[in-house]
Image: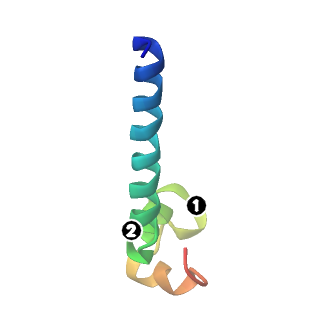
């Protein structure tokens, strides 16, 4: 197999695994709440535990 093609396939597989891991992490509301308190102005003065209640449904 061509080395470049093999490396491209392996790279895609690693990216897919990374994406899946990130989705699993963000599926936890408390982790998402920590991100929101750092990134969104409306949530900056709130504790992550308070923000969890504003996250609707399953992330």
Q: Is residue 21 above or below residue 24?
A: above
The residue that label 2 is drawn on is: 31
Q: Quadrant of residue 49?
A: bottom left
Q: Nearer the viewer, residue 34 or 20?
A: 20
- Residue visible at 55% across and 80% down? 58
Question: Which quadrant is the C terminus positioned in?
Answer: bottom right
* Residue at the front extreme, as displayed: 1
* Horizontal arrangement in the rendering, residue 58 relative to residue 9 (left or right): right
The answer to whether residue 45 is left or right of residue 54 is left
Residue corresponding to mark 1: 41
Q: Position of residue 21 (x, y in %)?
A: 38, 56
**Of 3 and 51, which appears nearest the observer?**
3
For the residues carrying marks 1 and 2, which lies nearer the camera in this image? Answer: 2
Q: Are marks 1 and 2 in contact (CB under 8 Å)?
A: no
Q: Residue at x 39, y 12 (%)?
A: 3
Res 16 seen here:
yes
At x 40%, y 48%, the residue is 17
Viewer can see residue 47: no
Residue 54 found in image quarter: bottom right
In x, y percent, where is residue 1? 42, 16
**Count of all numbered marks drawn on residues in the image:** 2
Instruction: Say what secondary structure mark 2 lies in.
Output: helix
Q: Considering only vertical position in the picture, is 41 above or below 52? A: above
Of helix, strand and loop, which one carries label 1? helix
Quadrant housing residue 7 = top left
Residue 11's spot in the image, x, y percent? Answer: 42, 30
Q: Nearer the viewer, residue 55 or 25?
A: 25
Residue 16 percent location from the top left of the image: 46, 45
Residue at the spot x=40%, y=47% of the render? 18
Position of residue 40 relative to residue 5, above or below, is below
User: Which tag, 1 or 2, sits closer to the chain's start?
Assistant: 2
């Amino acid at each position: 197999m061509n080395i470049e093609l093999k490396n491209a396939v392996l790279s895609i597989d690693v990216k897919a695994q990374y994406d899946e891991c990130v989705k699993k992490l963000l599926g936890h509301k408390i982790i998402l709440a920590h991100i929101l308190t750092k990134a969104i102005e409306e949530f900056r003065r709130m504790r992550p535990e308070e923000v969890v209640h504003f996250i609707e449904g399953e992330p």
